[in-house]
Amino acid sequence: MASLGSEREGWLAASAALGEAQGALVGDSVLAACSIAYLGPFEASYRQELVDGQWRALLDATGSISSSRHFDLRAAVGDAERMQQWQLQGIPDDRVSTENMLILEETAGDRWPLLVDPQEQALAFTREYLGHDYIPLKATSAGLSRVLELALARGSAVICENVGELDGSPALTSLLDRDVATIAGTRYIRLDDNQVEFHSDFRMFLFTGLANPHFSPAVQARVKLLNFTVTPEGLEAQLLALVCKSECQKEEDEKHRLHR
């Protein structure tokens, strides 16, 4: 017991933190659900304004639901090892990019993700994330429908670039509806005016290089819009991470080794 006495302060601090977390569990769960559902299209400053301003004020108004003083979606639903793996695969080392990946994984089976990525950082990461096992496409490619049919039947991942504002591609527009039906035990999805066999492993990632796209409400309702645009705050966070890696390479290498 005497040998364990040196751990007393650490245990007391951990116990106090756990008690605080338990008291804030309901509020944090509400904020996490709202963040996953609504924060994707916005940049960092507006996300912070929503979470710490409007949403927290609504929780406080109930008088019975409390949340953490410094809510962070990464701490609420993220896995430290998984997030470290994303960084090793090349995701930008800033809060918004990590939050976007958490939102993407939490809603993977809901709607196809549409990534606003004018600097193509998310595009480079997604290629690494998929292990280069994907079919590259452009929204203006000839024979788009035929390639999508093959990918749907085989369960391949598809990266579709240059989607613009999704007003000139009937094939993509119809696919966004995810109109899936089961006929004689086989699943089919509507593509254009045809019923195409649908493999459950099929995934599609849509990318637009437009810096300020204007998607109609109908399009936004059918995709998971994620904004990977690099803002000055995001660029500052990425540069700070690069400086740390450069100045403290030994510590960075040890951190990566421990997370493998």
Image (cartoon, rainbow, N blue to C red):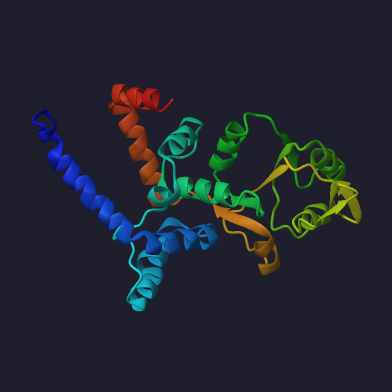
Q: Residue furthest left?
A: 2
Viewer-nearest residue: 5 or 186: 5
Give coordinates of residue 201: x percent, y percent: 72, 40
Viewer-nearest residue: 193 or 9: 9
Quadrant that contains the C terminus: top left
Give coordinates of residue 37: x percent, y percent: 54, 61
User: Image height check: is 225 above or below 139?
Assistant: below
User: Image height check: is 28 above or below 201?
Assistant: below
> Can residue 117 be spotted in the picture?
no
- In the drawing, does residue 59 fall left or right of residue 37? left
> Can residue 247 be spotted in the picture?
yes
Quadrant that contains the N terminus: top left
User: Image height check: is 252 above or below 220?
Assistant: above
Residue drawn at 66 percent across, 64 percent down: 221
Viewer-nearest residue: 223 or 207: 223
Residue drawn at 47 percent across, 30 percent down: 88
Residue drawn at 70 percent across, 33 percent down: 134
- In the drawing, does residue 144 fall left or right of residue 86? right
Viewer-nearest residue: 259 or 42: 259
Q: Quadrant of residue 238?
A: top left
Q: How many marks?
A: 0
- In the drawing, does residue 53 fall left or right of residue 101? left
Residue drawn at 78 percent across, 57 percent down: 173
Q: Quadrant of residue 46?
A: bottom left
Give coordinates of residue 123: x percent, y percent: 60, 40
